[in-house]
Amino acid sequence: MELKVIAYARNGHTDKFGIPRQSRDESPVLTRIVFEPEYNVREALRGIEGYSHLWLLWGFSETPMENWSPTVRPPRLGGNKRMGVFATRSPFRPNPIGLSSVRLIDILETTPENRIGLLVSGADLLDGTPVYDIKPYLSFSDSHPDAKNGFAEETKNYRLPVDWGQITDLPDPQTKREIEYILSQDPRPAYQNDPEREYKMDYAGWKIVFCVDPDARIHVRQLVSAHC
């Protein structure tokens, strides 16, 4: 079976470090889904405005594919505990396919790429991620409130407070909100907890340097615009 790329994701995640590990409805991060020329047809979106959420089927385009392993190390478990690959959402799987539930914000009649597109929030995608398909999310069949979350249950509400310190040259409110949300998710591997270690993240044209103190609070030490 050949999968065709129908669109590409465009957002501020220019580096894999910092991408949320799951799509989340409360995420303020905005992503444009920009259709490829062959699928740049407005009729293909007829009726989509009636849905609040969508499923995106996409590819782990930046994940090196080698021989698959039946077990992986989920980062939220400290990186030293193995689980079955099919019990995780790890990108290291036999077929590098991802599935994300996102909120539909708007239908874009034109984008900076001069294509039609969709504006969504909550996507856990790298800028340039290929999208293979889009399907409507149906609450009466896709939602299971009594579902069990396995070992992911213990970290589902994991959040860290973010302190901007003395930084005054802040980005626009929307980008600041997005950066703060991404940092609150704690992009570090769980096995790294050195409070003196600095981490660097690129997002939406900003270079962010931060550390995490022993009380699990994130401190932004440096914020520099890549355009300076």
Image: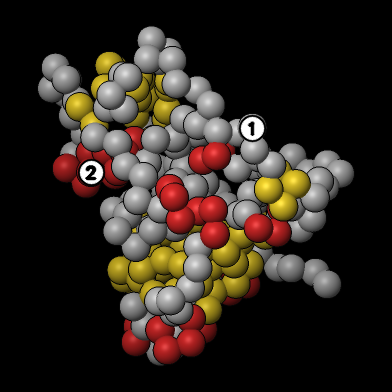
Residue 111 seen: no
Residue drawn at 65 percent across, 58 percent down: 87
Residue drawn at 44 percent across, 85 percent down: 138
- Which residue is more in the foreground, 22 or 174? 22
Left or right: where 170 falls relative to 36: left
Mark 1, residue position: 80
- Which residue is more in the foreground, 192 or 94? 192
Mark 2 lies on a secondary structure that is helix
Left or right: where 140 falls relative to 170: right
Q: Quadrant of the C terminus?
A: top left
Q: Position of residue 64 (x, y in %)?
A: 74, 40
Left or right: where 211 falls relative to 81: left
- Which residue is more in the foreground, 182 or 81? 81
Q: Position of residue 56 (x, y in %)?
A: 53, 68
Q: Residues within 10 Å of mark 1 (few under 14, many from 20)?
A: few
- The kind of residue tagged 1 is Asn
Q: CA distance from mark 1 to mark 2?
A: 32 Å
- Above or below 86: residue 219: above
- Quarter of the rendering containing residue 166: top left
Going by the picture, which residue comes out furthest to the right? 67
Q: Residues within 10 Å of mark 2 (few under 14, many from 20)?
A: some
Residue drawn at 70 percent across, 59 percent down: 86
Mark 2, residue position: 177
- Above or below 127: residue 120: below
Q: Going from the N terminus, do you reach mark 1 or mark 2 first?
A: 1
- The kind of residue tagged 2 is Arg
Q: Position of residue 202 (x, y in %)?
A: 42, 30
Q: Quadrant of the N terminus?
A: bottom right
Residue 74 seen: yes
Q: Nearer the viewer, mark 1 or mark 2?
A: 1
Rendering colour mode? secondary structure
Residue drawn at 68 percent across, 48 percent down: 83
